[in-house]
Image (spheres, rainbow, N blue to C red):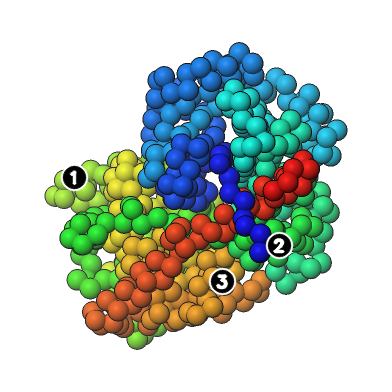
């Protein structure tokens, strides 16, 4: 069996490098430490410099680092870059690029890429322009580095592009720097997410969908075009789960060369006494906010349950979760009071001044009709979560067994109410629920069990499929529920059953379930999953060598 080729240099780019906006940030930032160990300072991340007029909390610029190369890039490529370290475990080199100067050239660039690849940018709208120009600039930066440091075919180099936003970088490299192997990872197909988000049945009819046709119907022509062509043109095409691999095969007409599941690093998980301290602190904060908002004391053994993620009401299964809570309220055998925290960023004005005041001055009781949200929404009447709360007749009165608290703010430690990060609150939960309908991987349930918090998810998430080979019930640490296009109510019933079952566990049973959850999480550490990326890099380099008629 031929030996897998290994890269000497790895360039990786994403819109989420030093820019925390979604799950890809977690993928890259946790994987970096493992790759930095094997490729010290030859692992270089490239991200968008969206922080020009403000301080980036994730990036430490280092004056003098690669100063000559920065000058070369400015002079030869007319691009301003900042070079430093990404403030994550491993502290890899990060390059932030100001891609805005390319915007005046976008029509010429679109025309050039059309001629070279056939990507249809005529129908572009929304965020397509900025993303494409950023992607193109990453290709220019990789070429600039390659030329300045006089790399050649003896240096095995891989350029890894994540999501459709960076595909123009892959096109640039394929055209201008063919001696570099290219990898493209789609974490979710743009057209698949759009089909699901537009309430069309994705799974039962997947074999009947034509990606190109649906892109016209859903006004996704350009995004779909660049993603599909990139999947076919790069040296190695990957995605993060088997379920998304099937989606790619049908909608992009390309089967992934390798599945690269998402892992995690455990460096951010507190240990021993620190874990216990953080858990107690989190529970104290959750209880204090809940009791202040609700206006009464919670029972001592109240069960804290949460969900979190992007505000994709259907795709993330928020609708199904809320329906399950209504079913749960009708269960007369429920052993504990259940307090649910829906931690989903929404359109807010800011933190609630009256709630913040009551938290700081407990003698001033909260006087408000709003016993549901921790922050002020711009529009309470059209918000999906608030509409469901009222539709299902949740009142948050003390006699109601299930209370719902909507936390519609990013939990970055400065939200004005909790002033803690999401992780610093997650550690205090008893149980989490993520009943996703469309979820290529699913970091939120994995993060949950990493903190020893048992979770409920579905087999329509990549993580749910990965874990469901051996697990199904909540007493095993992860409850996986079968979900399809049309069984939403059955899923809601099953969630309610699992929560009710978990609420009946005694302290020793809960301890055992929490331990099982942590054991499952350990199996998803990057040290177990990184070999999938080694395989992807090897495929890219092997195909590059064939392309350039080099002998491996």
Task: Name the residue located 24 percent from the left edge and 81 percent from the top edge.
Answer: 508
Rounded to the nearest angstrom, the CA distance separating label 1 from label 3 is 45 Å
Q: Position of residue 310 (x, y in %)?
A: 51, 52
* Closest to the observer, 264 or 220: 264
Given this view, does label 1 or label 2 mark the residue nearer the observer? Answer: 2
Q: Position of residue 168 (x, y in %)?
A: 70, 36
Question: Is 406 situated left or right of 552 in this image?
Answer: left
Q: Which residue is mark 2?
A: 247
Q: Which residue is mark 3?
A: 465
Residue 299, quarter of picture = bottom left
Find the residue positioned furthest to the left: 363
Callout 1: helix, strand or loop? helix
Residue 448, quarter of picture = bottom left
Residue 256 in view, yes or no = yes
Question: Is 302 situated left or right of 474 in this image?
Answer: left
Residue 415, quarter of picture = top left
* Closest to the observer, 108 or 218: 108
Task: Name the residue located 56 percent from the left edge and 41 percent from the top edge.
Answer: 8
Task: Name the residue located 36 percent from the left edge and 52 percent from the top edge.
Answer: 422
Q: Which residue is mark 1?
A: 360
């Amino acid at each position: 069996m031929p030996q897998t080729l290994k890269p000497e240099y790895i360039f990786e780019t994403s819109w989420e490098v030093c820019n925390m906006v979604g799950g890809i940030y977690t993928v890259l930032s946790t994987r970096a430490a493992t790759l930095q160990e094997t490729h010290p300072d030859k692992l270089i991340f490239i991200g968008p410099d969206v922080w020009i007029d403000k301080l980036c909390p994730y990036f430490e610029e280092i004056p003098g680092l690669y100063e000559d190369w920065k000058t070369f890039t400015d002079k030869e490529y007319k691009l301003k870059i900042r070079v430093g370290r990404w403030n994550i475990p491993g502290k890899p080199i990060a390059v932030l690029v100001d891609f805005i100067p390319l915007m005046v050239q976008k029509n010429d660039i679109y025309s050039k890429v059309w001629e070279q690849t056939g990507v249809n940018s005529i129908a572009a709208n929304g965020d397509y322009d900025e993303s494409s120009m950023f992607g193109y600039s990453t290709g220019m930066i990789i070429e600039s580095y390659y030329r300045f440091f006089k790399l050649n075919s003896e240096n095995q180099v891989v350029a890894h592009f994540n999501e459709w936003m960076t595909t123009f970088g892959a096109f640039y490299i394929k055209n201008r720097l063919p001696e570099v192997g290219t990898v493209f990872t789609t974490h979710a197909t743009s057209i698949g997410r759009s089909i699901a988000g537009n309430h069309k049945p994705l799974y039962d009819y997947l074999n009947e969908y034509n990606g190109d046709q649906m892109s016209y119907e859903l006004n996704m022509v350009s995004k779909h075009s660049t993603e599909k062509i990139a999947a076919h043109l790069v040296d190695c095409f990957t995605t993060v789960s088997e379920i998304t691999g099937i989606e790619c095969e049908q909608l992009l007409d390309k089967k992934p060369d390798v599945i690269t599941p998402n892992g995690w690093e455990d460096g951010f998980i507190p240990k021993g006494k620190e874990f216990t301290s953080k858990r107690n602190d989190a529970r104290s904060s959750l209880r204090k906010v809940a009791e202040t908002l609700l206006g009464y004391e919670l029972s001592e053994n109240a069960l804290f349950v949460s969900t979190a993620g992007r505000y994709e009401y259907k795709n993330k299964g928020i609708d199904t979760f809320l329906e399950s809570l209504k079913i749960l309220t009708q269960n007369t055998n429920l052993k504990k009071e259940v307090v649910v925290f829906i931690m989903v960023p929404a359109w807010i004005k800011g933190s609630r001044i009256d709630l913040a005041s009551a938290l700081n001055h407990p003698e001033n009781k909260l006087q408000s009709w709003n016993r549901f949200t921790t922050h002020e929404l711009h529009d309470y009447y059209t918000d999906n979560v608030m509409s469901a709360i009222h539709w299902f007749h949740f009142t948050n009165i003390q006699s109601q067994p299930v209370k719902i608290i909507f936390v519609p703010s990013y939990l970055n430690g400065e939200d004005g109410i909790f002033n803690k990060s999401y992780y610093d609150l997650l550690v205090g939960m008893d149980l989490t629920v993520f009943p996703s309908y469309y979820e290529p991987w699913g970091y939120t349930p994995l993060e949950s069990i990493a903190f020893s918090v048992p979770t409920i998810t579905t087999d329509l998430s990549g993580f749910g499929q990965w874990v469901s080979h051996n697990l199904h019930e909540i007493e095993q640490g992860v409850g996986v529920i079968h979900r399809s296009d049309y069984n939403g109510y059955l899923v809601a019933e099953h969630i309610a059953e699992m929560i009710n079952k978990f609420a009946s566990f005694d302290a020793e049973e809960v301890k055992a379930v929490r331990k099982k959850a942590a054991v499952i999480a350990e199996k998803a550490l990057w040290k177990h999953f990184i070999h999938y990326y080694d395989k992807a890099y090897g495929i890219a380099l092997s195909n590059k060598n064939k392309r350039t008629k080099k002998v491996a």
